[in-house]
Amino acid sequence: MLERMGCTYSVYRKKKSSFPEVVVFVPSTRIPVQSDFQRVLKGVIPRDLVDKLSSLRNQIVLVAEDTGGSAIAELRRALNEYLSVLIGLTKKEYGLDGLIEFKWKNFEDGRQDSSISNSWFEVLSAVHLMAMLTLSEADSLMIPKDPSGSGFRVVSSDSKREAIDLLLKVSGYLEFCVRDILTRIPAETKKTFPQDLQEGVLEAIAIQTLGQGTEIQLGLAVESQKATLSVKRRLACEQLIYFSQAYHCLLGCDINQGHGKKHLRFIKWKFLEAKAAAYYYHGLILDKGNEPSSHIGAVSCFLAAEELLAESKKACLSFCLAAPVTRAPPLWGAMKFLHQKIPEVASRKSQMYGYLWEQEKGLQALPDLPEFQLSLRPDDYELPEIDPSWDSTKWESLGQPLKEHLRDSDENSTD
Protein backbone atom coordinates (compact mmCIF):
# COMPACT_ATOMS: atom_id res chain seq x y z
CA MET A 1 0.00 0.00 0.00
CA LEU A 2 1.20 3.46 -0.87
CA GLU A 3 2.27 4.92 2.47
CA ARG A 4 2.73 8.59 1.74
CA MET A 5 2.69 11.39 -0.76
CA GLY A 6 6.03 13.00 -0.03
CA CYS A 7 5.48 16.44 1.39
CA THR A 8 1.81 15.95 2.25
CA TYR A 9 -0.06 14.36 5.12
CA SER A 10 -0.60 11.38 2.79
CA VAL A 11 -3.17 12.28 0.20
CA TYR A 12 -3.47 8.55 -0.37
CA ARG A 13 -4.74 7.61 3.06
CA LYS A 14 -6.66 9.12 5.92
CA LYS A 15 -4.70 11.53 8.04
CA LYS A 16 -2.90 10.06 10.99
CA SER A 17 -1.49 11.75 14.03
CA SER A 18 2.11 10.95 13.08
CA PHE A 19 3.87 13.06 10.46
CA PRO A 20 4.91 11.26 7.25
CA GLU A 21 8.54 10.76 6.37
CA VAL A 22 9.95 12.07 3.10
CA VAL A 23 12.74 10.50 1.09
CA VAL A 24 11.44 11.25 -2.41
CA PHE A 25 9.68 14.61 -2.55
CA VAL A 26 6.20 14.44 -4.09
CA PRO A 27 4.24 17.66 -4.71
CA SER A 28 0.51 17.65 -4.08
CA THR A 29 -1.39 15.34 -6.42
CA ARG A 30 -4.28 16.39 -8.66
CA ILE A 31 -7.12 14.16 -9.90
CA PRO A 32 -10.01 14.81 -12.31
CA VAL A 33 -13.40 15.99 -11.14
CA GLN A 34 -16.16 13.59 -12.19
CA SER A 35 -17.77 14.72 -15.42
CA ASP A 36 -20.32 13.81 -18.10
CA PHE A 37 -19.31 14.56 -21.68
CA GLN A 38 -22.69 13.56 -23.18
CA ARG A 39 -24.18 17.05 -23.04
CA VAL A 40 -21.35 18.56 -25.09
CA LEU A 41 -20.47 15.70 -27.43
CA LYS A 42 -23.91 14.16 -28.02
CA GLY A 43 -24.50 13.81 -31.76
CA VAL A 44 -20.97 15.01 -32.53
CA ILE A 45 -19.09 11.74 -32.08
CA PRO A 46 -20.49 8.22 -31.52
CA ARG A 47 -22.15 7.64 -28.17
CA ASP A 48 -19.90 4.68 -27.35
CA LEU A 49 -16.83 6.90 -27.80
CA VAL A 50 -18.32 9.57 -25.52
CA ASP A 51 -19.15 6.90 -22.94
CA LYS A 52 -15.62 5.55 -23.17
CA LEU A 53 -14.13 9.01 -22.49
CA SER A 54 -16.44 9.65 -19.53
CA SER A 55 -16.17 6.20 -17.97
CA LEU A 56 -12.37 6.05 -18.14
CA ARG A 57 -12.03 9.54 -16.66
CA ASN A 58 -14.48 8.78 -13.87
CA GLN A 59 -12.81 5.42 -13.26
CA ILE A 60 -9.58 7.29 -12.44
CA VAL A 61 -11.45 9.38 -9.86
CA LEU A 62 -13.22 6.39 -8.29
CA VAL A 63 -10.13 4.18 -8.07
CA ALA A 64 -8.08 7.00 -6.54
CA GLU A 65 -10.72 7.89 -3.97
CA ASP A 66 -12.00 4.40 -3.15
CA THR A 67 -8.58 2.79 -2.69
CA GLY A 68 -6.86 5.78 -1.12
CA GLY A 69 -4.65 5.81 -4.21
CA SER A 70 -2.97 2.53 -3.30
CA ALA A 71 -3.91 0.83 -6.59
CA ILE A 72 -1.10 2.49 -8.55
CA ALA A 73 -0.95 -0.20 -11.26
CA GLU A 74 -4.71 0.06 -11.84
CA LEU A 75 -4.55 3.86 -11.96
CA ARG A 76 -1.63 3.79 -14.38
CA ARG A 77 -3.49 1.37 -16.65
CA ALA A 78 -6.64 3.52 -16.58
CA LEU A 79 -4.61 6.66 -17.34
CA ASN A 80 -2.96 5.00 -20.35
CA GLU A 81 -6.34 3.86 -21.69
CA TYR A 82 -7.80 7.31 -21.09
CA LEU A 83 -4.91 9.06 -22.84
CA SER A 84 -5.37 6.79 -25.87
CA VAL A 85 -8.97 7.96 -26.24
CA LEU A 86 -8.32 11.54 -25.12
CA ILE A 87 -5.76 12.15 -27.88
CA GLY A 88 -8.60 12.15 -30.41
CA LEU A 89 -9.94 15.40 -28.92
CA THR A 90 -6.64 17.14 -29.73
CA LYS A 91 -6.74 16.30 -33.45
CA LYS A 92 -7.52 19.38 -35.52
CA GLU A 93 -9.35 17.37 -38.18
CA TYR A 94 -12.12 16.61 -35.67
CA GLY A 95 -12.53 20.23 -34.60
CA LEU A 96 -13.36 19.27 -31.03
CA ASP A 97 -10.72 21.14 -29.03
CA GLY A 98 -12.24 23.75 -26.71
CA LEU A 99 -15.66 22.09 -26.52
CA ILE A 100 -15.13 20.47 -23.12
CA GLU A 101 -14.30 22.20 -19.86
CA PHE A 102 -11.88 19.95 -17.99
CA LYS A 103 -12.00 20.25 -14.21
CA TRP A 104 -9.34 18.98 -11.79
CA LYS A 105 -9.02 19.11 -8.04
CA ASN A 106 -6.34 18.75 -5.38
CA PHE A 107 -6.52 15.21 -4.03
CA GLU A 108 -5.37 16.24 -0.55
CA ASP A 109 -8.09 18.77 0.29
CA GLY A 110 -10.60 18.07 -2.50
CA ARG A 111 -10.66 21.69 -3.69
CA GLN A 112 -11.00 22.30 -7.42
CA ASP A 113 -7.87 24.01 -8.75
CA SER A 114 -8.64 24.35 -12.45
CA SER A 115 -11.39 24.39 -15.08
CA ILE A 116 -9.90 24.82 -18.54
CA SER A 117 -11.37 24.23 -22.02
CA ASN A 118 -8.24 22.89 -23.70
CA SER A 119 -7.67 19.24 -24.61
CA TRP A 120 -3.88 19.53 -24.35
CA PHE A 121 -4.31 20.79 -20.77
CA GLU A 122 -6.17 17.56 -20.05
CA VAL A 123 -3.36 15.51 -21.61
CA LEU A 124 -0.84 17.47 -19.53
CA SER A 125 -2.79 16.84 -16.32
CA ALA A 126 -3.08 13.10 -17.03
CA VAL A 127 0.65 12.66 -17.74
CA HIS A 128 1.46 14.78 -14.67
CA LEU A 129 -0.70 12.46 -12.53
CA MET A 130 1.22 9.46 -13.89
CA ALA A 131 4.45 11.18 -12.84
CA MET A 132 3.19 11.88 -9.31
CA LEU A 133 1.99 8.30 -8.87
CA THR A 134 5.40 7.03 -9.96
CA LEU A 135 7.16 9.42 -7.54
CA SER A 136 5.00 8.06 -4.74
CA GLU A 137 5.92 4.53 -5.73
CA ALA A 138 9.64 5.41 -5.56
CA ASP A 139 9.12 7.04 -2.16
CA SER A 140 7.44 3.89 -0.82
CA LEU A 141 10.33 1.74 -2.00
CA MET A 142 12.80 3.94 -0.12
CA ILE A 143 10.79 3.93 3.13
CA PRO A 144 10.06 0.30 4.05
CA LYS A 145 7.74 -0.59 6.88
CA ASP A 146 9.26 -1.01 10.34
CA PRO A 147 6.78 -3.16 12.24
CA SER A 148 9.12 -3.58 15.20
CA GLY A 149 9.35 0.18 15.72
CA SER A 150 13.09 -0.16 16.28
CA GLY A 151 13.97 2.45 13.67
CA PHE A 152 16.42 0.00 12.10
CA ARG A 153 15.25 -0.56 8.56
CA VAL A 154 17.05 -1.94 5.57
CA VAL A 155 16.25 -0.98 1.98
CA SER A 156 17.53 -3.69 -0.35
CA SER A 157 19.84 -2.86 -3.25
CA ASP A 158 17.17 -4.16 -5.63
CA SER A 159 14.61 -1.74 -4.17
CA LYS A 160 17.07 1.14 -4.55
CA ARG A 161 17.76 0.26 -8.19
CA GLU A 162 14.02 -0.05 -8.83
CA ALA A 163 13.52 3.38 -7.24
CA ILE A 164 16.17 4.83 -9.58
CA ASP A 165 14.36 3.34 -12.59
CA LEU A 166 11.10 4.89 -11.40
CA LEU A 167 12.75 8.30 -10.94
CA LEU A 168 14.06 8.16 -14.52
CA LYS A 169 10.51 7.42 -15.70
CA VAL A 170 9.19 10.44 -13.78
CA SER A 171 11.82 12.67 -15.33
CA GLY A 172 10.82 11.34 -18.77
CA TYR A 173 7.13 12.04 -18.16
CA LEU A 174 7.81 15.62 -17.07
CA GLU A 175 10.38 16.35 -19.78
CA PHE A 176 7.73 15.26 -22.29
CA CYS A 177 5.22 17.60 -20.64
CA VAL A 178 7.56 20.57 -21.04
CA ARG A 179 8.87 19.71 -24.50
CA ASP A 180 5.82 18.27 -26.27
CA ILE A 181 2.68 19.41 -24.44
CA LEU A 182 3.21 22.89 -23.00
CA THR A 183 4.41 24.10 -26.41
CA ARG A 184 0.94 23.30 -27.85
CA ILE A 185 -0.97 25.39 -25.30
CA PRO A 186 -1.54 29.16 -25.77
CA ALA A 187 0.37 31.46 -23.41
CA GLU A 188 -2.86 33.03 -22.13
CA THR A 189 -4.22 29.60 -21.18
CA LYS A 190 -1.01 28.70 -19.36
CA LYS A 191 -1.40 31.79 -17.18
CA THR A 192 -4.50 30.17 -15.64
CA PHE A 193 -2.68 26.94 -14.71
CA PRO A 194 -2.36 25.85 -11.07
CA GLN A 195 1.06 26.24 -9.47
CA ASP A 196 1.97 22.55 -9.91
CA LEU A 197 1.77 22.85 -13.72
CA GLN A 198 4.01 25.90 -14.12
CA GLU A 199 6.78 25.22 -16.59
CA GLY A 200 9.55 25.97 -14.09
CA VAL A 201 8.00 23.65 -11.50
CA LEU A 202 7.74 20.80 -14.02
CA GLU A 203 11.36 21.37 -15.08
CA ALA A 204 12.54 21.51 -11.47
CA ILE A 205 10.94 18.16 -10.60
CA ALA A 206 12.21 16.56 -13.82
CA ILE A 207 15.77 17.57 -12.87
CA GLN A 208 15.61 16.93 -9.13
CA THR A 209 14.40 13.36 -9.73
CA LEU A 210 17.67 12.79 -11.60
CA GLY A 211 19.45 14.31 -8.59
CA GLN A 212 17.67 11.91 -6.26
CA GLY A 213 18.52 9.01 -8.54
CA THR A 214 22.18 10.07 -8.31
CA GLU A 215 21.83 10.37 -4.52
CA ILE A 216 20.72 6.73 -4.36
CA GLN A 217 23.59 5.74 -6.68
CA LEU A 218 26.06 7.46 -4.34
CA GLY A 219 24.64 5.52 -1.42
CA LEU A 220 25.14 2.27 -3.34
CA ALA A 221 28.71 3.33 -4.18
CA VAL A 222 29.48 4.04 -0.52
CA GLU A 223 28.26 0.54 0.37
CA SER A 224 30.36 -1.04 -2.39
CA GLN A 225 33.98 -1.99 -1.79
CA LYS A 226 34.67 -1.73 -5.51
CA ALA A 227 33.65 1.94 -5.90
CA THR A 228 36.68 4.27 -6.01
CA LEU A 229 36.97 7.72 -4.44
CA SER A 230 36.84 9.20 -7.94
CA VAL A 231 33.50 7.51 -8.61
CA LYS A 232 32.06 8.74 -5.32
CA ARG A 233 33.30 12.29 -5.93
CA ARG A 234 31.85 12.29 -9.42
CA LEU A 235 28.44 11.14 -8.20
CA ALA A 236 28.40 13.77 -5.41
CA CYS A 237 29.36 16.51 -7.90
CA GLU A 238 26.68 15.39 -10.37
CA GLN A 239 24.09 15.35 -7.60
CA LEU A 240 25.14 18.91 -6.71
CA ILE A 241 24.69 20.06 -10.32
CA TYR A 242 21.22 18.52 -10.62
CA PHE A 243 19.93 20.21 -7.46
CA SER A 244 21.55 23.52 -8.44
CA GLN A 245 19.72 23.41 -11.79
CA ALA A 246 16.43 22.46 -10.13
CA TYR A 247 16.80 25.35 -7.68
CA HIS A 248 17.24 27.86 -10.51
CA CYS A 249 14.19 26.47 -12.32
CA LEU A 250 12.02 27.18 -9.27
CA LEU A 251 13.33 30.71 -8.71
CA GLY A 252 11.28 32.10 -11.59
CA CYS A 253 8.04 30.49 -10.37
CA ASP A 254 5.26 31.62 -8.09
CA ILE A 255 6.03 29.42 -5.09
CA ASN A 256 3.64 31.09 -2.65
CA GLN A 257 0.82 28.68 -3.50
CA GLY A 258 0.45 25.02 -2.63
CA HIS A 259 3.69 23.36 -1.59
CA GLY A 260 6.00 25.76 -3.45
CA LYS A 261 7.94 26.97 -0.41
CA LYS A 262 8.36 23.45 0.96
CA HIS A 263 9.54 22.30 -2.47
CA LEU A 264 12.22 25.00 -2.57
CA ARG A 265 13.40 24.10 0.93
CA PHE A 266 13.68 20.44 -0.04
CA ILE A 267 15.94 21.30 -2.96
CA LYS A 268 18.09 23.55 -0.76
CA TRP A 269 18.47 20.74 1.80
CA LYS A 270 19.55 18.23 -0.85
CA PHE A 271 21.83 20.78 -2.51
CA LEU A 272 23.71 21.35 0.76
CA GLU A 273 24.03 17.61 1.43
CA ALA A 274 25.41 17.04 -2.06
CA LYS A 275 27.88 19.91 -1.73
CA ALA A 276 29.13 18.58 1.62
CA ALA A 277 29.66 15.14 0.08
CA ALA A 278 31.40 16.59 -2.97
CA TYR A 279 33.91 18.58 -0.88
CA TYR A 280 34.54 15.62 1.42
CA TYR A 281 35.45 13.27 -1.43
CA HIS A 282 37.38 16.00 -3.25
CA GLY A 283 39.36 16.56 -0.05
CA LEU A 284 40.22 12.85 0.24
CA ILE A 285 41.58 12.86 -3.30
CA LEU A 286 43.59 16.07 -2.80
CA ASP A 287 45.04 14.64 0.41
CA LYS A 288 46.71 11.90 -1.59
CA GLY A 289 49.06 14.51 -3.09
CA ASN A 290 52.58 15.05 -1.79
CA GLU A 291 52.73 18.85 -1.93
CA PRO A 292 51.87 20.97 1.14
CA SER A 293 49.33 22.83 -1.01
CA SER A 294 47.48 19.53 -1.56
CA HIS A 295 47.12 18.92 2.18
CA ILE A 296 46.08 22.52 2.81
CA GLY A 297 43.49 22.24 0.03
CA ALA A 298 42.25 19.00 1.52
CA VAL A 299 41.81 20.55 4.97
CA SER A 300 39.92 23.46 3.39
CA CYS A 301 37.58 20.94 1.72
CA PHE A 302 37.01 18.99 4.94
CA LEU A 303 36.23 22.14 6.93
CA ALA A 304 33.89 23.35 4.18
CA ALA A 305 32.17 19.95 4.16
CA GLU A 306 31.72 20.12 7.93
CA GLU A 307 30.16 23.58 7.72
CA LEU A 308 27.89 22.55 4.83
CA LEU A 309 26.79 19.47 6.75
CA ALA A 310 25.76 21.66 9.68
CA GLU A 311 23.84 23.95 7.28
CA SER A 312 22.15 20.94 5.69
CA LYS A 313 20.84 19.83 9.10
CA LYS A 314 19.25 23.26 9.56
CA ALA A 315 17.85 23.14 6.02
CA CYS A 316 16.37 19.71 6.73
CA LEU A 317 14.63 21.04 9.84
CA SER A 318 13.37 24.06 7.90
CA PHE A 319 11.96 21.76 5.21
CA CYS A 320 10.27 19.48 7.75
CA LEU A 321 8.62 22.37 9.58
CA ALA A 322 7.30 24.04 6.42
CA ALA A 323 3.61 23.33 5.90
CA PRO A 324 2.49 20.62 5.65
CA VAL A 325 4.75 19.36 8.46
CA THR A 326 6.77 16.21 7.70
CA ARG A 327 9.74 14.44 9.22
CA ALA A 328 13.04 13.29 7.78
CA PRO A 329 13.69 9.54 7.68
CA PRO A 330 16.55 8.00 9.66
CA LEU A 331 19.92 8.69 8.01
CA TRP A 332 20.36 6.53 4.92
CA GLY A 333 22.67 6.11 1.96
CA ALA A 334 25.80 8.25 1.79
CA MET A 335 24.61 10.61 4.53
CA LYS A 336 24.44 7.78 7.06
CA PHE A 337 28.19 7.38 6.54
CA LEU A 338 29.12 11.04 6.03
CA HIS A 339 27.39 12.41 9.13
CA GLN A 340 29.95 10.47 11.13
CA LYS A 341 32.99 10.67 8.85
CA ILE A 342 33.01 14.37 7.87
CA PRO A 343 33.37 15.80 11.43
CA GLU A 344 35.80 13.02 12.33
CA VAL A 345 38.08 13.55 9.30
CA ALA A 346 37.86 17.35 9.48
CA SER A 347 39.04 17.29 13.09
CA ARG A 348 41.81 14.77 12.52
CA LYS A 349 43.21 16.39 9.38
CA SER A 350 43.06 19.90 10.88
CA GLN A 351 45.20 18.71 13.76
CA MET A 352 47.53 16.77 11.48
CA TYR A 353 48.21 19.69 9.10
CA GLY A 354 47.74 22.56 11.55
CA TYR A 355 51.38 23.61 11.20
CA LEU A 356 51.05 23.86 7.41
CA TRP A 357 47.82 25.80 7.83
CA GLU A 358 49.66 28.42 9.91
CA GLN A 359 52.70 28.56 7.62
CA GLU A 360 50.79 28.86 4.34
CA LYS A 361 47.90 31.14 5.17
CA GLY A 362 47.86 32.49 1.63
CA LEU A 363 47.05 29.06 0.19
CA GLN A 364 43.89 28.46 2.22
CA ALA A 365 41.41 29.33 -0.54
CA LEU A 366 38.76 26.68 -1.02
CA PRO A 367 39.64 24.56 -4.09
CA ASP A 368 37.16 24.47 -6.98
CA LEU A 369 35.17 21.30 -7.41
CA PRO A 370 35.73 19.48 -10.71
CA GLU A 371 32.99 19.60 -13.34
CA PHE A 372 31.54 16.47 -14.88
CA GLN A 373 29.08 15.63 -17.62
CA LEU A 374 25.82 14.44 -16.13
CA SER A 375 25.28 10.70 -16.36
CA LEU A 376 21.57 10.12 -15.71
CA ARG A 377 19.10 10.94 -18.46
CA PRO A 378 15.29 10.87 -18.43
CA ASP A 379 13.62 7.81 -19.92
CA ASP A 380 11.96 8.42 -23.27
CA TYR A 381 8.20 8.77 -23.09
CA GLU A 382 5.64 8.92 -25.88
CA LEU A 383 1.86 9.14 -25.73
CA PRO A 384 0.00 5.90 -26.48
CA GLU A 385 -1.43 5.27 -29.93
CA ILE A 386 -4.80 6.86 -30.62
CA ASP A 387 -7.73 4.57 -29.81
CA PRO A 388 -9.14 2.79 -32.93
CA SER A 389 -12.61 4.09 -31.98
CA TRP A 390 -11.59 7.40 -33.56
CA ASP A 391 -11.54 5.84 -37.02
CA SER A 392 -14.46 7.87 -38.43
CA THR A 393 -14.84 5.57 -41.44
CA LYS A 394 -16.31 2.99 -39.07
CA TRP A 395 -18.75 5.37 -37.39
CA GLU A 396 -22.45 4.79 -37.83
CA SER A 397 -24.66 7.72 -38.81
CA LEU A 398 -25.04 10.31 -36.06
CA GLY A 399 -27.82 12.72 -35.27
CA GLN A 400 -25.47 15.39 -36.61
CA PRO A 401 -22.69 13.87 -38.74
CA LEU A 402 -19.19 15.05 -37.93
CA LYS A 403 -18.81 16.74 -41.31
CA GLU A 404 -21.94 18.82 -40.66
CA HIS A 405 -20.68 19.67 -37.15
CA LEU A 406 -17.39 20.85 -38.59
CA ARG A 407 -19.15 22.82 -41.33
CA ASP A 408 -21.42 24.46 -38.74
CA SER A 409 -18.37 25.32 -36.64
CA ASP A 410 -16.66 26.93 -39.65
CA GLU A 411 -19.80 28.94 -40.52
CA ASN A 412 -20.19 30.15 -36.93
CA SER A 413 -16.57 31.25 -36.80
CA THR A 414 -17.09 33.47 -39.90
CA ASP A 415 -20.30 35.12 -38.69
Image (cartoon, grey):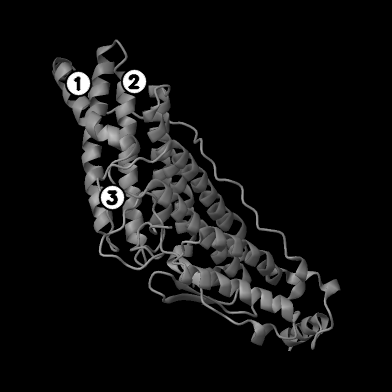
Q: Nearer the viewer, residue 157 or 307?
A: 157
Q: Which badge, 2 or 1, is on the more N-terminal residue?
A: 2
How far apart marks 3 and 1 lie (CA) works out to 30 Å
* Vertical position of residue 230 compared to residue 339: above or below: above
Disc number lying in front (3 or 1): 3
Q: Contact, CB < 8 Å: mark 3 with mark 1? A: no
Disc number lying in front (3 or 2): 3
Residue at the top extreme, as displayed: 290
Q: Nearer the viewer, residue 383 or 159?
A: 159
Q: Residues within 10 Å of mark 2 (few under 14, many from 20)?
A: some
Image quadrant where residue 279 sits = top left
Secondary structure under the numbered disc 2 in the rendered image? helix
The residue that disc 1 covers is 349
Residue type beneath disc 3: Ala
Q: Nearer the viewer, residue 398 or 119?
A: 398
How far apart marks 3 and 2 lie (CA) works out to 31 Å
* Vertical position of residue 337 compared to residue 405: above or below: above
Secondary structure under the numbered disc 1 in the rendered image? helix
The residue that disc 3 covers is 328
The residue that disc 2 covers is 285
Residue type beneath disc 1: Lys
Q: Position of residue 71 (x, y in %)?
A: 50, 61
Q: Please state if 131 lies on the left or on the right of 92 as rendered.
A: left
How far apart marks 2 and 1 lie (CA) works out to 13 Å
Q: From the image, which quarter does the C terminus lie in?
A: bottom right
Q: Residues within 10 Å of mark 1 (few under 14, many from 20)?
A: some
Residue type beneath disc 2: Ile
Q: Residue at x 35, y 37 (%)?
A: 333
Q: Position of residue 31 (x, y in %)?
A: 49, 70
Q: Which badge, 3 or 2, is on the more N-terminal residue?
A: 2
